[in-house]
Image (spheres, rainbow, N blue to C red):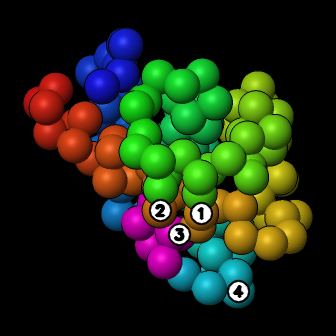
Amino acid sequence: MPKHLSLKEVGLIKRHSYILKKLAKSNSKDRKAIIRNAPSELFQALNLIFKLLSTDKIELNKQQTNKIKRHKNLLRKTSRLSSGGIKRQLQNQKGGFLPAILSAALPIIGSIIKNII
């Protein structure tokens, strides 16, 4: 369970959960198209997820921790960026950073949102 997650933050993630799930499952071409046309609130939601994962406010099981471990430095860097900076970072990404992070984080965050609301 997270140490603190406000209702505003929960609402932000809940509003964009459909797009986040699509980003986690899409190929790189579709992911770039989604990111290019995405609203700035989506990047605020991603920033919140990156902050939660980089500060260990969410308890992950061993499999999810191993999935995220390779991307820990990138998580720390992106958690300090603004929404525009995150958009640039994700548009220029190489490799599978975003799907790996989202596939590990979304099930946990989904259960947290259900517990709060």
Residue 6 in picture, x, y percent from top left:
33, 17
Which SS type dominates the magenta stretch?
Answer: helix
Read off the residue under disc 3. 23
Find residue 106 and report its horizontal and vertical position in percent.
39, 53
Q: Nearer the viewer, mark 2 or mark 4?
A: 2
- Residue 107 appears in the rendering: yes
Q: Which residue is mark 1?
A: 100
| Disc on the earlier residue, 3 or 4 | 3
Residue at 53% of width from left, 69% of height from top? 23
Q: Please state if 10 lies on the left or on the right of 61 as rendered.
A: left
Q: Which residues are magenta?
A: 20-25
Contact, CB < 8 Å: mark 2 with mark 3? no
Question: Of residues 58 and 114, which is closer to you in this image?
Answer: 58
Secondary structure under tag 4 reads: helix
State the image coordinates of residue 100 (x, y, percent, origin top left). 59, 63
State the separation of the CA atoms marked 3 and 4.
11 Å
